[in-house]
Amino acid sequence: MAAILDQSDSNQENQRHPRLIGWMLLSPLLIWLALFVIAPAAILFVYSFCSRDALGQVVYDFNLGNYARVFDPIYIKILLRSIGYAALTTIICIILGYPVAYFIGKARPDTRNLLLMLVMIPFWTSFLIRTYAWITILKSEGLMNGMLQYTKLISAPIEILYTPYAIIIGLVYAYLPFMILPIYGSVEKLDNALVEAAMDLGAGPVRAFSNVIIPLTWPGIVAGTLLVFIPSIGMFAITDLMGGARVPMIGNVIQNQFLQARDWPFGAALGMTLMFLFIIAFALLTRKSHPA
Amino acid sequence: MKRTQLACLALASILALTFSACSPKSSDPTASGKPTTGSKQLNLFAWSEYVPQAIIDDFTKETGIKVNYETYASNEEMVSKLVAGATPYDLVMPSEYTVEALLKANKLAPLDLTQIPNIKNIAPEYTNLAHDPGFKYSVPWMSGSVGIVVNTEKITDPVTGYADFFQEKHKGRIVVLNDNREMVSWVLNTLGLSINDVSPANLEKVRPILAGWIKMVKVFDSDSPKTALLNGDVDLGIVWSGEAAILYKENKKFKYTLPKEGAHRFIDSLAIPVGSPHADAAHLFINYILRPEVSVIISQNFPYTNPNLEARKLLTPEELGNPASYPADSSMLETFRDIGMAAADIDKLVTDLKSSN
């Protein structure tokens, strides 16, 4: 009896140690998440049921008025438009990013590292500075119009800056690397033997691509889609700087509540709604990526 | 990005808690919260791009008081941080309607005018205004207006007011401030209504006109509306007078006009929040910047309208002749009053109109 007890004790001891070490190793991440993700989200959640006073301070009274306002047609329309822009950005990023990622993944190792570095070089400069660089390129008297007019391709400057086209260019530019890198990760792991096997069994290039390569790189596409789609819904800097703040996106509306309108509870309710939508989208996408 | 901001807020409040828990133990007598004489530092919370570094350096050299200059980009941001109470600010720089809002909430301490003899330099038109009755809580720093700037090389027809400005032929050639309350005030001026009467009934009258105007605008930008004009992307703008003054200095083709229907005069003032730990240093600083030879440095760096008459005498004729800084006739100017909760109605109206664009 005593021996059995002893044994079970030492068993527990053995299990406990690695677990404890595991938790200790995880603790920086957990503390970080608790402080910077969970705590702010909890504050937002509480605020979203409050109201504001004349000076814009949060008044702690429970009400659902902010959520009722979220479903006002004005904001639903803006939300749908933001989703549309984000979806278009994601699709363009997949179309542009997939071949690049595939090429990098299949290149020789030394070329591959060089190409990967080229993809990452833009991150060495501040995002805002890169956006201002686009303004210099796209403006009426800018580089692009100057070159096109000099080469007599066009007679009058093309107006791109401060139009929806500029917003899409800015979004695709900002998020393209987030599509390329995860797809590259999947392509690198892709076993060429499987593609050759498909060809041997009579599949043409199109069939091999759609039935073998796409399913095998699907996790990369899903990860890239999440990394591009979600941040581009909430983006407000590009719509302000390159879109001329003409068409409000949901990110601009939320930003306005925290600054100009001084209505933090409504901003919080919009933020919570958006977060809820992200969770649903995440659940749907990740479920698809593990086909039964 | 919003989440990052909130994370920063959370971190700031944690730091603030730590700080306030420690301060009673601190040996610094000035941290006790009571105004004491001989403070060695000053927490200045002011607009970004508005306080020349030279002034701060010279003040420290003369008085030995270290100035901690923290900046903000909007009145609303300043109010949020001030009422959160994380940092004990000694001086803030609210615009006129924010002075009024802070006074209503008892957030400002009365000034001891005996410590500010240089206040006599302020022009009478800036004293005893509706937002600070009796002139007891705020001292004007700089003033300015919101008006029309036109690139006269591209637009040759005269533009004297909002009616000339918002015309179909100017569609897509216009930049305006990305400020919802400003936009609504232009329509109220056009309708002959008070820019401070933003009742739901008036906003309904504003709606159809503003809807038409918003369709003509190419760029909305409050931070640097001069950029689109300088880049040649637009030829007309409704901008801060200081931006227009810089454009005029750059090129005389940019002509500034105050709309004949009426316009907004903003007054940014220095004020001492309740609970300021270094109120003596704050008074010293206010008196210091009211010296003509100091105040003129502000004008040279940021060409808004200087309310300090003695400082104006030190300006060059060219600086005084800049029509954006010193318009010939400013009788149609009106200041903003605090509108409290109506800010949300205005935000909703403009968001709706922009969205239907």
Image (tube, grey):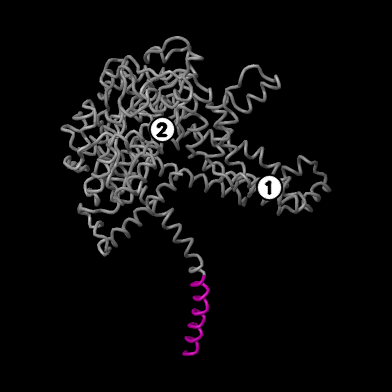
Residue at image position (51%, 67%) is A25
What amino acid is labelled 1 in the image? Pro
Determine whether, in the image, residue B295 is placed left or right of residue A38. left
Q: Which residue is mark 1?
A: A215
Q: Which residue is mark 2?
A: A75
Per the image, label 1 sits on a secondary structure element best described as helix
| Cα distance in 3D space between marks 2 and 1 | 37 Å
Chain ID, mark 1: A
Chain ID, mark 2: A
Q: Main secondary structure of the magenta part?
A: helix
The correct choice, above or below, for B328 with respect to B271 in the image is above
Determine whether, in the image, residue A223 is placed left or right of residue A52. right
What amino acid is labelled 2 in the image? Tyr
The correct choice, above or below, for A31 with respect to B100 in the image is below
How far across and how far down the image is residue B13, in percent? 34, 53
Q: Along the line of sight, which residue is nearer the eye, A233 or B308?
A: B308
Q: Residues within 10 Å of mark 2 (few under 14, many from 20)?
A: many
How far across and how far down the image is residue A188, in percent? 71, 52
How far across and how far down the image is residue B146, in percent? 35, 24
Q: How many discs mark residues in the rendered view?
A: 2
Q: Residues within 10 Å of mark 1 (few under 14, many from 20)?
A: some
> What segment carries the magenta color?
A1-21
